Image (tube, rainbow, N blue to C red):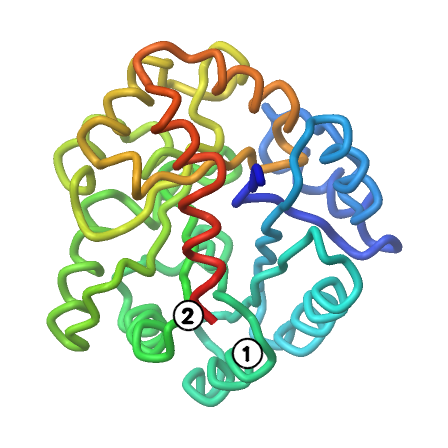
Amino acid sequence: MVTDFHTHVYPDKLAERTIEKLKGNAKVVKTFSDGTVRGLLHSMEKGGIERSVILPVATRKDQFDTINRFALEINKTYPQLISFGAIHPDDDDPEEKLRYLKDMGFFGIKIHPDYTNTFIDDERYIRIIRECARLGLLVVSHAGVDPAFEVVHCTPQRARYVLDRVFEETGVKEPFMIFAHLGGMFAHKDVMKYLAGTNCYIDISCSFNEIMEFCETSDEDVAEVIRIHGADRMLFATDSPWNDQNETLEHFRAMSGVSDEEKELILSQNADRLLSRQ
């Protein structure tokens, strides 16, 4: 079962406006679906992807109920879709809210330090990530540059600090953090220095400069990260609707320097293992 571990959707009545706003902010990105659940399902069918993980982002603390209600409805309605939950670093009593997400069957949360104007090693995020470690919730974080922002709030150095600190404070050995965009968009050298080989997962969304205009890393860079970090801790991901699922999947399958066995781990087996923890 091929799993895309990094996608986004929005409620039907908000999708068009949200997509246009995000495109305007980023200035350099295209879209390959309309940002709705229906659009994602059509993209998956076209691309031969059997399961997609949806990663909502809370940009304000008052969005907790509405975003997670929408995510929960997706999980109840579509067996081929798995939506994570969302929480903002300013949320009141994050431990209680994370326990709620765990009780509701969510596998994890998505955080986007740029959209919350909060560095990932800020004490508010440390508090959230530490509790996720204790609860067994996965944490997916945007990593590296986001074209809509000038400040990079999750650098590989800061990500490494978080990994080391949360391990020291919790003793949780099972990797539960997932850093998007090959560990840090526009930060490949620092990814190799600080993150490759550490106790986390890395997704490959927005990592191929041959198919994405806004991307620095080549196929050789992706293969290097897989070799050093380990194929057993890499995840196939597209960041749909910002990349075409079919094109990304075909490109990855045709890559040289990565064995068929490694590709199978990245396309399906690692996701299967992570999504069977509950």
Q: Residue 222, image x and y in percent?
A: 33, 22
Is 46 positioned to the left or the right of 218 in the image?
A: right
Q: Residue at x 75, y 41 (%)?
A: 40
Name the amino acid, label 2.
Leu
Q: Residue at x 37, y 43 (%)?
A: 143
- What residue is pinned by disc 1? 101
To which quarter of the image does residue 118 belong? bottom left
Q: Mark 1: few, some, or many residues within 10 Å (few <14, many ≥20)?
A: many
Q: Residue at x 40, y 46 (%)?
A: 270
Count how many numbered circles sit on residues in the image.
Answer: 2
Residues 270 and 138: in front is 270
| 204 vs 94: above or below | above
| 261 vs 269: above or below | above
Q: Residue 242, image x and y in percent?
A: 63, 32
Residues 217 and 135: in front is 135
Tell me the number on the disc at residue 121.
none
Quadrant placement of the N terminus: top right
Tell me the number on the disc at residue 137.
2
Q: Earlier in the sequence, mark 2 or mark 1?
A: 1
Is 143 positioned to the left or the right of 7 in the image?
A: left
Name the amino acid, label 1.
Leu
Residue at disc 2, secondary structure:
loop
Q: Residue 183, image x and y in percent?
A: 32, 39
Disc 2 to disc 1: CB gap under 8 Å: yes
